[in-house]
Amino acid sequence: MYAIMGVTGHVGGAAARELLRRGEPVRAVVRDQAKGADWAAAGARVAVADFAHRETLAESLRGCAGAFVLLPTDTAAADPDAAHRTMADTIAGAVRESQVPHVVMLSSVGADLADGTGPIRWLHHLENGLRASGAQITAVRSGHFQEKVELLLGAVLHAGLYPVFADSADVPTPMIATRDIGGVVADLLLTPARASEVVDLDGPSYTERQVAEELSAILGRPLQVVTIPRPGWAAALVDGGLPPRLAEELAGLYDAERRGILQLRGDRRLTGRTELPETLRHLAKSIGTI
């Protein structure tokens, strides 16, 4: 049995579907019983757990051969740093209490750094907490998701703008589809290494301008690429609906990327093969724009 946190999201859902496709038993961990109905219909067992409650989360992991965990973003937290560090401690404590022998964790490029990376530093905290839990840990450090354009859809659909939080829209950047990450997670759960490790995930490279051009072609509408100067990043994110303190954290992440400190430094590297146009077509179809 493999427990999957975040099963209603992109990566957790892809991992659970891949395990079920291979005939493996899955325990879908959800925070709301209603969200587990589709997974139960698909053949998974459903466990309801509050990700901020160590005892119920530990129970959802107990008895499993492996588990996939991630740190959800709490957009409502008054103090994002304290809230996410506390949740990371809760997840690590649940892993320790459950005695699940192997955990695959969704992390990020840059999680080897303790500070200066915005919200990635919370994944650094979680990685270290999990390593102290007694379980074998596989930290999957991904770079940009191809699905990150979801965060920009308000500006794209309502204003015809594609905002870029960088000095240039023409720098090639590796971007991986979450379906590929989910496939890697399933592989790592089924065939763990002999010891804890860090796996870097790479993908095809695109510039932000290429992303905008592909999205424009799929949507059938022109998009204007707009690079936002560093001083305006947080304000632009707030205008997009994020709380101010979380917007400042994300601005810190973009700045870390601008400074070039987010590098692949894992024990080995795997590469996703899905190309961006396929991901964007699927995304546009899912939101009913094509």
Image (cartoon, rainbow, N blue to C red):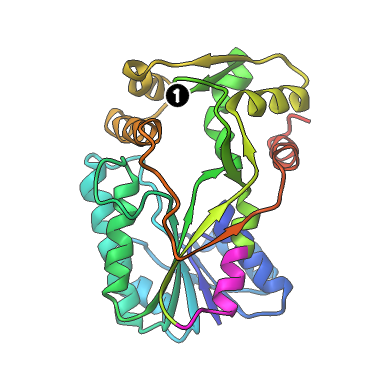
Q: Is residue 48 above or below residue 271?
A: below
Of residues 17 and 170, which is closer to you in this image? Answer: 170
Q: Which residue is mark 1?
A: 166
Write down the region rendered in magenta. 184-194
91 w.r.t. 123: above or below: below
Report the amino acid beneath label 1: Ala
Q: Position of residue 97 (x, y in %)?
A: 30, 80
Principal secondary structure, stretch drawn in magenta: helix
Quarter holding residue 13 = bottom right
Quadrant (top left, top right, bottom left, bottom right) of the N terminus: bottom right
Left or right: where 248 falls relative to 196: left
Residue that appears at 25% across and 50% down:
83
Relative to 66, say whether 259 is above or below.
above
- Is residue 193 on the magenta stretch? yes
Question: Residue at position x 63%, y 70% from top?
Answer: 40
Identify the residue at horizontal 35%, vertical 81% (top origin): 98
Residue 70: x and y, percent?
43, 59
Q: Is residue 8 visible?
A: no
Position of 281 with respect to 253 (left or right) is right
Helix, strand or loop at disc 1? loop
> Mark 1: few, some, or many residues within 10 Å (few <14, many ≥20)?
some
**Depicted 16 relative to depicted 109: above or below:** below
In the figure, residue 249 lies in which quadrant? top left
238 with respect to 225 (left or right): left
